[in-house]
Image: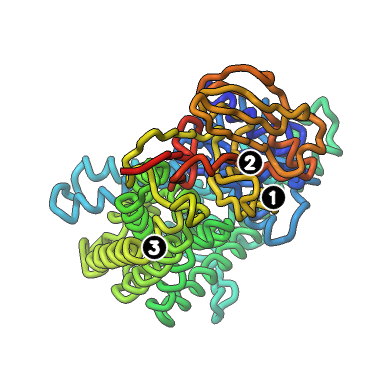
């Protein structure tokens, strides 16, 4: 029940259950396919507690949650009653640009297996590390069993992809699995080693292929499909088309077994004869192209991929590179793409560490700890969206540092030999199967150190951390100065707490001249993230507008406070506002005064920026304002002083 309300709010603000085609999740994000993205309340979602940010990319509406996304996903599915066993229908798949559909396809196929894929790679990497340092003998039983644990998924990868690809394309997943099982069937894989070829096709070309068997007189080019990626995905695509056609023409009474039977009888021979060889050649060419680009200049390739990887992640473009990397492991036994982006999470972690140490903002400091830990382990979204991007400079310094780290990795020729884990768990994947720990592995350590130190120093010295987080209040030379409550000893003072949860802004920033000019009094504005207004002081309700959008409170010591919810919201006539007090009531600090519907007010076209004003500032010799960027109810917002020591 922990995330029930959050899940309800998310579903409501993505346009409701009826607007959701499908929902899946990756390491940090809920990935929605929506029928109409314009129905989603993006700004409301971004402001929710429990939501880091919202991204739109690759035809998906992505709600970034953080490390506990799997728990939220379970609650979203339960609350929404969504069916996670099937994907969107064929008509929905056709929506969006070709590129969006491609990215959506790749993410839909690979996202479900990323966790176990990374886990298997980590086991293989650590097993190689144990052999390299002499803890295990590669002929011993312990090594063999651990190798089987780590290698099983990769060897039978087509079977898993057969399931996820068929599910993504809208077919029966088990048909895809059976197609993949046929591709890795041991008896067929062993034929080339046990017999001589009948003849050779395409002799003298790059596609030269010996033929060992025929299917009704048609030559079959046997390939090695274990650990392959592209052949099964292409086969699954055609299998779905054939399955749907057969389902329309075969009578319902025998449909249950005849549809899969004829689908398999058509697709599996077709895959061995045509799809498999062509897809395999395409895989080999794709691998050769990436190696060729890398060979042109490993340093430039490293700087480009390292520097822009986080940008790719922001827009979901990294999904176009992940299958290439997996294909490289299959075709070449190694991959440089995922190796060259290795430093990015450490650079981000270092930048967040600098922010953590230097910031005076308590909320930022609180967020930095888990974001730093997540980044060390390769999960970058919490730190990127929650801290680095909003502060801008730390994000830029992270990209620069990651680019330099990528260049160093390219210089040392650091390459991955298994699809390993993320962050620190990726280190073992760089260990050469035969050479063990070599200069390439040492280079990865150097790259991490250089990238991390650079990101930390740049962010600490030039990140403008507190400058960007501090609200600069208005200064009237006669009446107030911009000081914090820690910088002055109070005498006969009053503390006004925040009536709302939200972002603090200067009055001069708001779009209302009467407030922005200071004519109404001294104070600050709050951009609320929750539609609840609490009393900032103990006092008496001296004014309550009939429209309930504004309220005046006078404290026991005579401070007069005006709180005005939104700009021009008087025009709503009280709609979307509920008051729990009346004029003349005495209230305690922290009492709920008014509730208002943020979503509906924004939909009606009104700003919800809320000025909190001291309307009798002449009574005080000194007025100071919070330096917090984000405030919660009961946190100090304004300090009034009659005198100072």
Q: Position of residue 342 (x, y in %)?
A: 37, 61
From where the camera sits, is residue 189 visible?
Answer: no
Judge whether 168 appears above or below 1 on screen.
below
Q: Position of residue 124 (x, y in %)?
A: 31, 49
Q: Which numbered disc, 2 or 3, marks the residue closer to the eye?
A: 2
Reading the image, the residue beneath label 1 is 514
Q: Of label 1 and label 2, which has the lower sequence position?
A: 1
Q: Position of residue 192 (x, y in %)?
A: 46, 60
> How would you rate the neighbour count of disc 1 (Cα within 10 Å): few for under 14, some for 14-19, many for 20 or more?
few
Q: Nearer the viewer, residue 63 or 290?
A: 63
Is label 1 in a helix, a strand or a loop? helix
Reading the image, the residue beneath label 2 is 610
Quarter of the image that includes the C terminus: top left
Is label 2 in a helix, a strand or a loop? strand
Gap in Å between the C-alphas at discs 3 and 1?
A: 35 Å
| Mark 1 in CB contact with mark 2 (< 8 angstroms) | no
| Mark 2 in CB contact with mark 3 (< 8 angstroms) | no
110 relative position to 355: left or right: right
Residue 463 image label? 3
Judge whether 246 appears above or below 538 on screen.
below
333 relative position to 284: left or right: left
Q: Position of residue 464 (x, y in %)?
A: 40, 62
């Amino acid at each position: 029940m922990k995330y029930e309300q959050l899940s309800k709010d998310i579903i409501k603000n993505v346009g409701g259950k009826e607007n959701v085609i499908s929902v899946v999740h990756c390491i940090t994000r809920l990935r929605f396919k929506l029928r109409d993205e314009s129905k989603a309340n993006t700004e409301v979602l971004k402001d929710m507690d429990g939501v880091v940010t919202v991204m739109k990319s690759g035809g998906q509406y992505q709600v970034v949650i953080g490390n506990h996304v799997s728990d939220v996903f379970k609650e979203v599915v339960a609350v929404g009653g969504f069916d996670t066993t099937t994907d969107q229908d064929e008509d929905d798949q056709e929506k969006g640009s070709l590129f969006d559909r491609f990215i959506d396809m790749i993410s839909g196929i690979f996202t479900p297996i990323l966790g176990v894929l990374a886990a298997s790679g980590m086991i293989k990497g650590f097993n190689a590390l144990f052999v390299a340092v002499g803890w295990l003998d590669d002929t011993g039983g312990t090594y063999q069993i651990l190798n089987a644990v780590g290698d099983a998924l990769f060897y039978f990868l087509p079977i898993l992809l057969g399931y996820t690809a068929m599910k993504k394309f809208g077919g029966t997943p088990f048909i895809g699995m059976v197609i993949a099982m046929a591709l890795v069937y041991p008896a067929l894989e062993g034929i080339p080693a046990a017999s001589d070829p009948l003849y050779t096709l395409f002799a003298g070309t790059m596609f030269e292929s010996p033929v060992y068997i025929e299917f009704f007189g048609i030559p079959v080019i046997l390939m090695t499909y274990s650990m392959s990626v592209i052949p099964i995905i292409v086969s699954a695509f055609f299998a779905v088309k054939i399955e749907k056609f057969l389902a329309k023409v075969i009578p319902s009474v025998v449909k249950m077994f005849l549809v899969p039977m004829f689908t398999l009888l058509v697709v599996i021979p077709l895959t061995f004869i045509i799809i498999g060889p062509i897809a395999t050649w395409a895989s080999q060419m794709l691998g050769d192209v990436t190696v060729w680009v890398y060979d042109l200049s490993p340093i430039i390739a490293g700087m480009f991929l390292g520097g822009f990887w986080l940008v790719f992640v922001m827009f979901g473009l990294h999904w176009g590179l992940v299958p290439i990397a997996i294909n490289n492991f299959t075709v070449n036994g190694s991959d440089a793409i995922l190796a060259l982006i290795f430093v990015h999470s450490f650079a981000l972690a270092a930048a967040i560490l600098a922010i953590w140490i230097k910031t005076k903002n308590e909320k930022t400091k609180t967020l930095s700890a888990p974001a730093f830990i997540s980044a060390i382990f390769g999960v970058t979204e919490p730190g990127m969206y929650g801290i680095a991007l909003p502060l801008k400079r730390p994000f830029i310094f992270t990209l620069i540092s990651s680019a330099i780290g990528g260049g160093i990795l390219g210089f040392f020729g650091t390459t991955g030999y298994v699809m390993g884990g993320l962050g620190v768990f990726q280190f073992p994947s760089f260990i050469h199967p035969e050479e063990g720990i070599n200069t390439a592995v040492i280079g990865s350590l150097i790259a991490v150190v250089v990238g991390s130190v650079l990101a930390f120093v740049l962010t600490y010295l030039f990140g403008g951390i507190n400058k960007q987080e501090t609200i600069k209040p208005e200064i009237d030379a006669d009446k107030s100065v911009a000081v914090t409550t820690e910088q002055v000893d109070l005498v006969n003072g009053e503390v006004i707490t925040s009536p709302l949860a939200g972002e603090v802004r200067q009055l001069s920033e708001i779009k209302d001249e009467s407030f922005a000019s200071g004519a109404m009094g001294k104070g600050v504005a709050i951009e609320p993230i929750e539609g609840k207004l609490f009393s900032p002081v103990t006092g008496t309700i001296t004014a309550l507008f009939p429209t309930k959008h504004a309220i005046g409170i006078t404290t026991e010591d005579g401070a007069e406070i005006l709180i005005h919810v939104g700009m021009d919201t008087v025009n709503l006539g009280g709609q979307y506002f509920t008051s729990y007090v009346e004029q003349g009531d005495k209230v305690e600090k922290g009492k709920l005064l008014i509730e208002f519907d943020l979503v509906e007010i924004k939909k009606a076209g009104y700003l919800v920026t809320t000025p909190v004003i001291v309307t009798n500032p002449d009574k005080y010799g000194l007025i100071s304002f919070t330096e917090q960027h984000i405030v919660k109810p009961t946190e100090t917002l304004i300090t009034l002083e009659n005198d100072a020591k």
